[in-house]
Amino acid sequence: MSVITGSAALRQERDWNIGWTDFGPFLALLALLVVGFLVNPDFLSATNLGNVITRSAFIAIIAVGATFVISSGGLDLSVGAMAAFITGITIMFMNSMAPEWGVWAIPAGMAVAVVVGTGCGLMNGLIVTVGRIEPFIATLGTMGIFRALITYMSDGGTIPIDRSLREAYRPVYFGTVGGIPLPILISIAVAAVASFILYKMKYGRKCAAVGANEDVARYSGISIVKTRTIAYAMQGACVAIAAICYVPRLGAATPTTGVLWELQVITAVVIGGTALRGGKGHVWGTVAGAVILELIANLMVLSDFVSEYLVAGVQGVIIIIAMLIQRFSK
Amino acid sequence: MSVITGSAALRQERDWNIGWTDFGPFLALLALLVVGFLVNPDFLSATNLGNVITRSAFIAIIAVGATFVISSGGLDLSVGAMAAFITGITIMFMNSMAPEWGVWAIPAGMAVAVVVGTGCGLMNGLIVTVGRIEPFIATLGTMGIFRALITYMSDGGTIPIDRSLREAYRPVYFGTVGGIPLPILISIAVAAVASFILYKMKYGRKCAAVGANEDVARYSGISIVKTRTIAYAMQGACVAIAAICYVPRLGAATPTTGVLWELQVITAVVIGGTALRGGKGHVWGTVAGAVILELIANLMVLSDFVSEYLVAGVQGVIIIIAMLIQRFSK
Amino acid sequence: ADKKVIAVSIPAADHGWTAGVVYHAQAAAKEVNTAFPDVEVVVKTSPSAAAQVSALEDLSAGRKLDALVILPYSSEELTTPVKAVKDAGTFITVVDRGLSDASIQDLYLAGDNIAVGRNTAKYLIEKLGGKGNLVVLRGIPTVIDDERIQGFNDAIKETELKVLDIQYANWNSDEAFKLMQDYLAKYPQIDAVWANDDDMLLGVLEAVKESGRKDIKLALGGNGMKDIVKKVMDGDAMTPVETPYPPAMIKTAIYMTIANLVGQAPVRGTVKLDAPLITQENAKEYYFPDSPF
Amino acid sequence: MFAASRLQQESDEAAGGDTCGPVLQAKGMSKDYGPVTVLSDVWLDVLPGRIHAIIGENGAGKSTFMRLLAGYAEPTAGTLSIAGYDVRFSRPEHAQQAGIVLVHQEILLAEGLTVAENLFLGRELMWNGMVDDQSMRRIAAEKLLELGCRVSPNALVRDIALADRQLVQIARALLDDYKLVIFDEPTAVLTGDEVERLLGIILKIKEQGAAVLYISHRLDEVQRIADQVSVLRDGKMVGTYPAQGLTQMDMARLMVGRDLAALYPVKRLKASNVPSLEVRGLVVSGYAKDIFFTAHKGEILGFAGMIGAGRTEVFEGIMGLRPAHGSVVLNGRIIDIRHWRAAMDGGIGYLTEDRKGKGLLLNEKLAPNLTLSALTRFHSGLMMRKAREQAALVKAVENYDIRLKSFGVKAGQLSGGNQQKLLLAKVLLTDPSIIVIDEPTRGIDIANKAQIYAFIQRLAEEGKTCIVISSEMQELIGICDRILVMREGRITGEVTGEKMTEHEIALLATSDVTTAASREE
Ligand SMILES: Nc1ncnc2c1ncn2[C@@H]1O[C@H](COP(=O)(O)OP(=O)(O)OP(=O)(O)O)[C@@H](O)[C@H]1O
Ligand SMILES: Nc1ncnc2c1ncn2[C@@H]1O[C@H](COP(=O)(O)OP(=O)(O)OP(=O)(O)O)[C@@H](O)[C@H]1O
Ligand SMILES: O[C@@H]1[C@@H](O)[C@H](O)OC[C@H]1O
Ligand SMILES: [Mg+2]
Ligand SMILES: [Mg+2]
């Protein structure tokens, strides 16, 4: 009998398959750590790795959101500008509430951030889905809009957070729980929730289906508009969470906050193993991708081999090599 | 008999359809011109339109190249940095040859530019096709590399063209033939050649096939590697042509030359009606797209309605509206 | 022997002026590292504020820094991180873009941006006889940009000079070229142009030249770019003056910091580099043909 | 294998064939996908001037075998030889250069390109160094017309019907010189007329002296045109037989390895007069108008018609999958079909005719495909219940007799017929009260057809309404209580009882020249 009916055999096979694809980014990460150590042994010191991973949290959190968008067949170029805009709104809100509510302005501001972020994401989503505009263009447009708004709100300058709130807010970036920096925990939590949504919930299936083949999704009763719009809204929420962690680190929103984050975010997602044309998303791969990017930057600072003019070039080379390692490892 | 009339009737209908898709960008352009005139009648003055269209020539020429890349299912984020790099090399070459060859250094430099550009494009193409790396990442990497190289070559400063060559070279940007500025003529020529290649030559078919469905292309005996690599090489050549026109405009290459051109280029292609996921390319639509972008920027300056902080935002809004008009017009 | 470590953290070469900063910082590092065997200068560039904060963390994670010379990417965002470095016992020298909390700065060296705007304005008032139409090109939305504009605006307030238009061209010559073309299309009568940075002035001059318009009498910049200083030196009619804003200030800052560390010459406080008008007479002093800027 | 080659010789004589050598010989071909063996040690001689049918159950390995012959895949073991020389085809062009062309079972065209562009893809006609679009369009139109396909050569493949796509694919294969044409289920998506025309063309190919390999689950076609028949079972060659004297029942027995019961179930009495779906004045712009009909509970209602008659579009319109308007009453409640999914949520299940493009996620595993339109049922708390999904898959594999070599395969790796079965299982998982099946047995082998018919009948007996759109008149006549016939976007008549004959249906489905001409005004 050539037809298999046992389901035990099935499980084995499947896990094996998924394993390989998922390993790629982690292999690249490993390779990078080894190279890093050879370049400068300090690279592997606990403080340094702690710093680097902590700071990769912003990109990681946003990129987790982008994993939804990209897996559902979309793209969001506006995330960096949106982060700046949300940071601005949040700080302004907190500052205005601080005199009355004191430290309570902080959680209130965080709630505002999430609401605004989700709203911005929703807007992106609706323009793309209902307006049926190519995501690249739609979000390039909203990128301009968010960037203009933050510039306008800050009068071209900065929107610093009220001094009275600083100390209370600091731990959100600088605090640790059980020795682990809070941003790392937050990004792990975000990734965990995301992978639950993407791999365990109904919505994850819809997302992958819409990204893989719109027609099949439609004929299966899955709403493309709804699915993709939700992905954008979640992206917005993730940007908000990243913004919340960002404020205590830099203490202000400026017109240049988050410039070019979109490229880093998309790079993290792709390095993580999610295809840009949509389909299956790889949440943990995305997180690894974000860490890889930050490690590369860190390596550049720690090494003394490279002329300061060539840093960007060496980063480019490393990224390409990292991708080749992935290809190769498959 | 009736069968034949039947298919003739059908044919007409289809032609009509194709017409519509091609008209979209031109409609948007028209709408923009009308709005522009209402905002400020100077908008339609010959000088202003001449300036704007001349300026749009770089983006148009590069975007024509990008039409190949995108139509074949690729993407190239490195064009802006590549333009800067080629400009730098070209100027350095011309300067070094000027003492010996005099004005002949200019055409020689142009040849060098084209060779270097094609080489850079080829490199991009090979990384994408042979290395099988997602184009977004591959060209983000080479973007960093080109940018680093020009920064390095210029020591972070400028590489100005030799005074002795300036006057002789100037007409390439500022000259006119029959009253029409040279860059406009050059971009028309480039677009004409491109549309010949894309619509009249075998290669064009291959390009569209590779972009539309890789499997089908492969089974039809079309080499995906070759087709896509050639597209990137042509992109490189177009960047070189744009660079050649660019040099006399400001007479120097700097690390900031061409920053963010890639976004404008891709936007022009998409506004022009070519889908980002590949397939049929629309060369003339792309040219219209490039002009649209430049007109929007121009309109912002000519109007007095918008706070200078919000210009980018309004541009975003207009682009989105332009795309909606196109959707709507279909 | 314990080497003294001086970290220099500056923005990446994202336009001509910052490129000059990188150039001079690296040149200084090279000189110092050969001249002073017991001092090590490390230069790091960063393409954004966030990256610069990271670089600070990275620089101070491995070793103790004796001094930090920093040109902050932006003021507010770098304030807290620089404070953290200072709290570890590092001497802090800040260049150009100041921190929000001035008490962190052991040494502050900057150009006088208000003066850049004011001195240029004064020259214009004088030359145009206190009246005429102006257009202005400004840089990247930052405090420095605001200060220059403020200095300029305050100076022309009481006059009949009218600013027809003012827009951002992001300290980029290409954008300035386009913007100037558009200004020319929009306004039939422009008496003078001010671009608050020389990168932009290059674009402006090209646009004016190409238009063939004769109404523009003056086109001024600022920053002391060598090509512009050369023009001044040569007595150019359209650009007869210039204000300095030398990127070499980073070098000065590095040397002053070293003097502090090794020379037992305590240098503290604020140093403002004046922004006098560069004219044909004194232009030679400001002309450095070998600098990339 | 000895048996096979002996039979081969016998059949040569039986067909009274000329003695010139085979155009292609397959010698001990095997194909493995990883640990899975799909084809093992298959031998075959393909003779010129013969139509050689390959039959076998779904998943027997027919398509795989053909892909090996035409250079779309390389064998794990075994060789091909032409005129005594061993050859290797590592790409389709190599086979094409040797005159071997394959018409795929699954449609392989670039949707974003036009019909003419697809037809000539990779071998464009040139004129003075330029692609000669005019000639290509003209020739395309001619070639298509020969096949009875009237789509405009300028139409995008995306916009044309599935059957037309198949014809384009066939035209494409026949464009070049060929010594051997392989048809892998070419008629699965065609209706009566086109089938006839295609069979005529195949006979013409044979007359020209070329060889034809022909795969079909429509055994009557095989019987009509084949000279010899080879049977594959489970990846192995059972034998090659002269077609003459082989009845359909014989073929079925050879394929399945046992005797088969009757193909069509015995008809029941018509169950009820309770209307379940009433459609009044439906218009699907560009495809259908004035559509009025009523379907009843427990009824099997057939929709017949030629390609392009608009049957698919009518139901896609009702399902909200393409713009349409008109009144639709579902189990007594008016639903707004402009509202997407209203019909689905109201309990209509629709099985698309385009399993590859609209039915299945080819790159996805089987379980996620199966449950995609009924996610809610495999979902409790917040989570998808994977164990339940697996159980459903195991059950579907049994119920619908889906043949697979491993549960780990992706949907796209299933054989065509098994994909169809998976799709059927998928739609029925939504537990619809009205089920619309567009081409239910497309690509399904004869044993499974019987099973599916029985299945449809069982659904009807449970009181569900089954609407069957089919291009096989026999099948409609065999299972339906009532058949509506469409022509050019309108319902032209209804046949029941005695009048349910091919003749009657064909009359309603085809228009005479004059009415067609007047309609074109
Ligand atoms: N790429 C692949 N990977 C794994 N298994 C495959 C692959 N391609 C085909 N198979 C398996 O090979 C077997 C034979 O498939 P094939 O398509 O040749 O069958 P077939 O005889 O054409 O069936 P049908 O009549 O349904 O079209 C099937 O079990 C199928 O699942
Ligand atoms: N091909 C189909 N034919 C008939 N009905 C279908 C088909 N595909 C899906 N449906 C129906 O469409 C709906 C989609 O199922 P799903 O599990 O996504 O439900 P849902 O939770 O209501 O969706 P949503 O969260 O988008 O509202 C179900 O009502 C299902 O019965
Ligand atoms: O980077 C800035 C430079 O371009 C401007 O002209 O002067 C101040 C600097 O900070
Ligand atoms: Mg098959
Ligand atoms: Mg149909």
Image: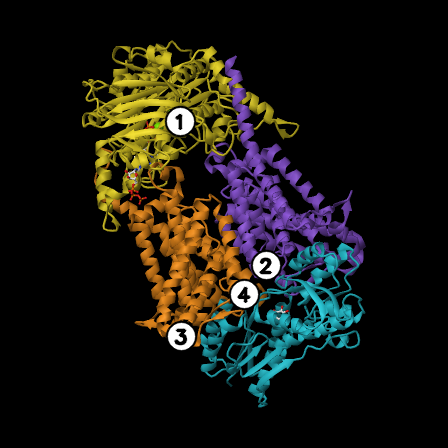
Chain colours: A orange, B purple, C cyan, D yellow
Q: Is residue A118 visible?
A: yes
Q: Quadrant of ligand 1?
A: top left
Q: Which of label 4 and label 3 is nearer to you?
A: 3
Label 4 CB less than 8 angstroms from ligand 3:
no
Q: Which residue is mark 4?
A: C47
Residue D394 place in picture, x, y as percent: 22, 38
Q: Which of label 3 and label 2 is nearer to you?
A: 3
Q: Which residue is mark 1?
A: D283
Q: Please tell me how crowded label 4 is: few (under 14), some (14-19), or many (20+) other residues with Cα within 10 Å.
A: some
CA gap, disc 3 to disc 2? Answer: 47 Å
Amino acid type at mark 2 = Arg
Seen in the picture, residue D57 relative to C256 is either above or below; the reply is: above
Amino acid type at mark 3 = Pro
Q: Are marks 1 and 2 on the same chain?
A: no
- Local SS, label 3: helix
Residue A321 place in picture, x, y as percent: 48, 56
Amino acid type at mark 1 = Val
Q: Are marks 1 and 4 on the same chain?
A: no
Q: Total number of numbered labels?
A: 4
- Local SS, label 2: helix
Parent chain of label 4: C
Residue A252 place in picture, x, y as percent: 47, 70
Question: Where is residue B29, by image quadrant?
Answer: top right
CA gap, disc 1 to disc 4? Answer: 60 Å
Q: Which of label 1 and label 4 is nearer to you?
A: 1
Give the numbered dot on residue D3: none
Q: Is residue D366 visible?
A: no
Is there CB contact under 8 Å for labels 4 and 3? no
Q: Which residue is mark 2?
A: B147
Q: Which of label 1 and label 3 is nearer to you?
A: 3
Residue C181 place in picture, x, y as percent: 70, 55
Q: Please tell me how crowded label 3 is: few (under 14), some (14-19), or many (20+) other residues with Cα within 10 Å.
A: few
